[in-house]
């Protein structure tokens, strides 16, 4: 496990290298394989980490903004998106 200084330095470097990020609720292990397979097969440079101590959220980090948008469109829960009034 990293100490807080090492984690901060790692996160800063990750933010510089992969600034396009998507935070999703953590899925069950069986669903994680679909995400990992997609990342390995279709995305250039990426990284990911657990957002909090309870592993409730995972932050997926991408070098290419198009990779982040395609990932978001495919895996972001549709019910959580805001709708414009109109």
Image: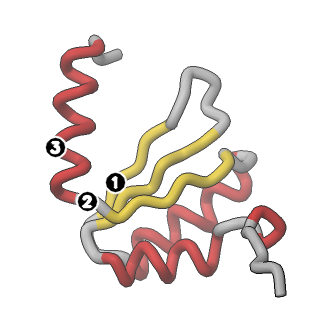
Q: CA distance from mark 1 to mark 3?
A: 11 Å
CA–CA distance in space, label 1 to label 2: 8 Å
Which residue is depicted at the point 40% across and 70% down?
Answer: 40
Disc assigned to residue 13: 3
Quadrant occupied by the C terminus? bottom right
> Measured along the vertical axis of the image, is residue 63 above or below residue 70?
above
Q: Secondary structure at mark 2?
A: loop
The mark lying in front, picked from 1 and 3, is 3
N-terminal of the pair, mark 1 or mark 2, is 2
Which element type, helix, strand or loop, lies under badge 1? strand
In 3D space, how far apart are the residues under numbered discs 2 and 3 (Cα atoms)? 8 Å
Residue at 43% from the left image edge and 41% from the top image edge: 49
Q: Which of label 1 and label 2 is nearer to you? A: 2
Instruction: Establish if 62 lies above or below 55.
Output: below
Closer-to-camera residue (28/79): 79
Q: Earlier in the sequence, mark 1 or mark 3?
A: 3
Q: Measured from the top left, where is residue 82 in percent x and y?
A: 74, 69
Q: Quadrant of residue 66?
A: bottom left
- Residue ID at (61%, 41%): 57
Q: Position of residue 29 (x, y in %)?
A: 69, 47
| Residue 53 in picture, x, y percent from top left | 56, 21
> Measured from the top left, where is residue 70 in percent x and y?
50, 82
Query: Crowdedness of circle 3 by 10 Å Cα count: few (<14), some, many (20+)?
Result: few
Along the line of sight, the residue nearer the viewer: 46 or 11: 11
Q: Which residue is mark 2?
A: 18
| Marks 1 & 3, CB-CB < 8 Å contact | no
Q: Are marks 1 and 2 in contact (CB under 8 Å)?
A: yes
Mark 1 surroundings: few (<14), some (14-19) or many (≥20) residues within 10 A: some
**Residue to which mark 1 is pinned:** 47
Residue under the point 35% across and 16% down: 1
């Amino acid at each position: 496990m990293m100490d807080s200084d090492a984690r901060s330095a790692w996160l800063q470097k990750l933010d510089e290298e992969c600034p396009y990020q998507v935070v999703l609720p953590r899925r069950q292990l069986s669903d994680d394989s679909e995400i990992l397979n997609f990342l390995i097969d279709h995305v250039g440079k990426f990284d990911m980490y657990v957002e909090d101590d309870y592993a409730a959220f995972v932050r997926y980090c991408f070098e290419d903004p198009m990779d982040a948008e395609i990932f978001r469109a495919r895996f972001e829960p549709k019910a959580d998106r805001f709708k414009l009034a109109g």
